[in-house]
Amino acid sequence: MKNLLILGAGTAGTMMANHLRPKLYSNQWNITIVDQYKTHYYQPGFLFLPFDTYTEDQVKKEGKKFIPKFVNYIQKKIEKILPEENKVILEDETLEYDVLIIATGSKIAPEETEGLIGPLWKKDIFDFYTYEGSLALRNKLRDWKGGKLVIHITEMPIKCPVAPLEFAFLADSYFRKKGMRDKVEITYVTPLTGAFTKPTCSTALAYLLKEKGIHMESDFAIEHVDNETKEIVDFEDRRISFDLLVTIPTNMGDEVIAKSGLGDDLNFIPTDHNTLQSKAHENIFVIGDATNVPASKAGSVAHFQAETLTDNILLYMDGFPLKKEFDGHANCFIETGNNKALLIDFNYVTEPVHGNFPFAKFGPLKLLKESTFNHWGKLAFKWIYWNMLLKGISIPFVSRNMSFKGKVFDIKPDSK
Amino acid sequence: MPVKTIAGIEINVTEDGYLEDMSQWNEEIAKEIASEIGIELTPKHFEVINYLREKTAAKEALTIRSVGKSGIVDVKGLYALFPKGPLKFSSKIAGIPKPTSCI
């Protein structure tokens, strides 16, 4: 018997277990998946939890329910990977593997920024990238009286790069509905050159910030948080004051990656962009947020990667060359508030464009344009996630590689 | 695609002036882009620029943090070399793509 070992039972790891179990003879390959946590979170829901759109129960389920039969599920902490010995050390046992899939994801590292975890943390400073943070923020917003709301990105890369912007749009709608928009000043702070960095998007979407009265501060690389004056401060001593700071801290790969000497300076694993094989070890494959590939860290990306990676693992097991197939395909709904959303479809090289999706002629979803139908799509996605995506069922008519059918390349960037 | 004459050579650039092809770059081009921004390049600037180009050629993502840990400069030092947007300006001068997000 040979051993296929999957580390991490989040979106990517769970999908891989579901893809591979039916494709591998159970008298030839054991499949084991390890994750220390019992709960599987629907992470896109963390965006809606603070605004009371979703309840706690809608964003979490028991992880075990999504692991297929005949997969050995171990709920223990992973201590270290020994890639030269093909072993993984858990808290009280050691596993051997023939093929390893690392799907340990990424998480926030607020301790990387001085003053973030200080007297104001979880009082006036919140994250919404964790269940606990998102829930604490909901409770804060329920009776917040208004003031300066600052939404801030520490540094790239982050999981779901559009979520902070969606948060700003949803906050605008939330305070309008509560009849207190005039009491709230919303500022969006980014280390990049603006909220929209792709020429097609800045042309097509720049109106959104103006329409919603969201002030923007760009090129801001935070140095520390001043808890006394309630300001974020950058390396040139530029200061932005806040009453309520919603921050996206540095995102990093799991510390087990650092301990095992497998990652870069953010603990992301150097991975072939197209095959998803780790660059250092041919029997180690990496998927989802744990990789260093320049695709978005998002569930849709992990979903498209999972289809390619399944094929490649089967090819690897049989000694065939791997497919250089994955193209960085991402497909994401972006909430813009007022029950509307955008949809974007892009890959490593092609920027988001206009068009219809998934059907070239009639959509029904519109790319890069706000619509109520897209918002319904985003809400329906929760059902698709729990019932199809995690189980490794392909979403009908949506291919792993980006399709150019129905795409309209009509956006001419503004000349500056 | 706009074409701009920099240091006497016709170069393909993006709408906001970043080089489309990093292989068209040379030190004279770097100096001219830098002077447009208002930066006079020193050997220290070139150490940072060469580091950025090496990393980009190896298809590694660049962050202010990674430059700060490169051993060439710390983040404060990077700001001192390229004020008001260190990665944005250093990338432009180094002839590599602008750091972007997914939209």
Image (cartoon, coloured by chain):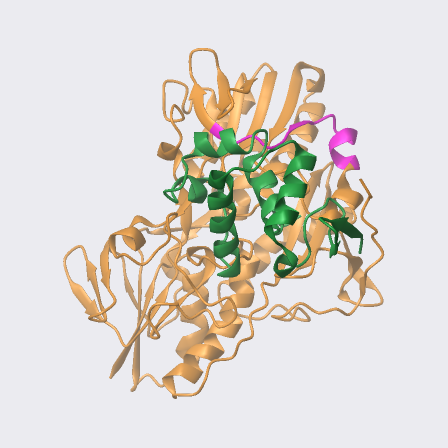
Chain colours: A orange, B green
> Is residue A265 placed above or below A316 in the rendered structure?
above
Image spot of residue A218 (x, y percent) = 62, 31
For the N terminus of chain B, the image quarter is bottom right
Image spot of residue B58 (x, y percent) = 48, 61
> Is residue A321 placed above or below A124 in the rendered structure?
below
Residue A24 visible in the displayed image? no
**Left or right relative to B31: residue B81:** left
**Left or right relative to A219: residue B44:** left
Looking at the rendering, which quadrant does residue A94 occupy?
A: bottom left
Residue bounds of the magenta highlight: A207-222
Residue located at (71% from left, 24% from top):
A176
Q: Is residue A345 magenta?
A: no
Residue located at (39% from left, 34% from top):
A110
> Is residue A281 placed above or below B74 in the rendered structure?
below
Image spot of residue A185 (x, y percent) = 66, 19
The count of marks equals: 0
**Left or right relative to A333: residue A55:** left
Residue A97 visible in the displayed image? yes
Q: Nearer the viewer, residue B11 or B87?
A: B11
**Left or right relative to A208: residue A135:** left
Q: Is residue A220 magenta?
A: yes
Looking at the rendering, which quadrant does residue A33 occupy?
A: bottom left
> Is residue A29 placed above or below A175 in the rendered structure?
below
Residue sitting farthest toward the left: A92
Image spot of residue B83 (x, y percent) = 56, 29
